[in-house]
Amino acid sequence: MTPILMWVFPIYFLIPIVMCAEVFGGILLSRRWKVHAEDKARLWKMLFFSATCLPIGISVGAFIPVTTLKIFTSVLVLFFSAYLLFKPYVNLPVSSTLDSLAGGLSGLLLGTCGIGGPPAALYLNATNQAFQRTRSLLSHFISGISLLAILAASLMGGGFGWLSYLPAAIFAYWVGMRGAQYLLLVSTISDAAIKKACLLLLITNSGFNLLLLLIS
């Protein structure tokens, strides 16, 4: 959502809109994805470092030209999507230091350009723990930093004017979820094919934004 909406809203206004949609999706999925008992302490640690770095990111983002932020965000999404699409075999150990670093980088990026998931997602995908644990931990982490971002962006100059756009964002997210449920019921498309299609969509999105920036 973020690369496209950056053409419409300023970053401090955009963050709460996007993050509310993320929280809405997290609530819908939380019943299925429970955090493993061993990962609860990790989740709180990642959220702590994210909360610490989030205001710093918002402050830094305020001094960066809008065009530079758009380019950086599109390149970030492009790299993240291509990385997951081509699946390089990089293995990282689960450690307290890397948990803290991933959480801090996620908060910093979220405050700067409105996208905080890539550092945590890349780190957790590179660990050797079970996919179910990784997915649950990542989902709850994203919901947590989304709530932090809504509060921080609103209190650090954005205000609460974004609330008028929230119904449209929630409705669009709900339509997407319902559409996904319908496609899964009527088709035999595999999880791998869905993931590939989503990543290709993100790459196309980022490439289109970069092309617009080049033209303008």
Image (tube, rainbow, N blue to C red):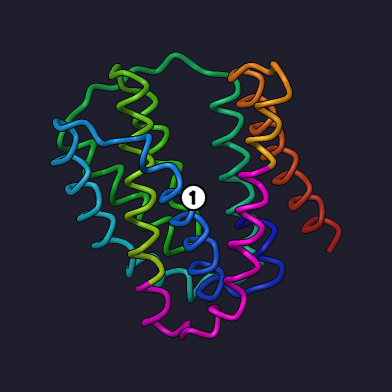
Residue at the outermost right position: 215
Q: Quadrant of the N terminus?
A: bottom right
What residue appears at the point 67 percent right and 51 percent down from the top-left corner? 175
Left or right of 77, for residue 138: left
Magenta span: chief secondary structure: helix
Give the quadrant of residue 93. top left
Residue 177 higher or lower than 52, as above or below: above
Per the image, label 1 sits on a secondary structure element best described as: helix
Mark 1, residue position: 25
- At which x and y percent is residue 41? 13, 41
What residue appears at the point 45 percent right and 42 percent down from the top-left corner? 118
- At which x and y percent is residue 203? 69, 37
Left or right of 128, for residue 182: right
Give the quadrant of residue 69. bottom right
- At which x and y percent is residue 102? 30, 42
Q: Residues within 10 Å of mark 1 (few under 14, many from 20)?
A: some
Give the quadrant of residue 155. bottom left
- At which x and y percent is residue 131? 37, 21
Left or right of 37, for residue 119: right
| Numbered circles on residues, count | 1
Which is nearer the eye, 140 or 62?
Answer: 140
Taking the magenta stretch, the answer to whether it contains residue 173 is yes
Q: Quadrant of the C terminus?
A: bottom right
Residue 108 higher or lower than 42, as above or below: below
- Which span is picked out in magenta? 151-178
Residue 170 higher or lower than 131, as above or below: below
Taking the magenta stretch, the answer to whether it contains residue 37 is no
Which is nearer the eye, 162 or 6?
Answer: 162
Q: Amino acid at mark 1?
A: Gly
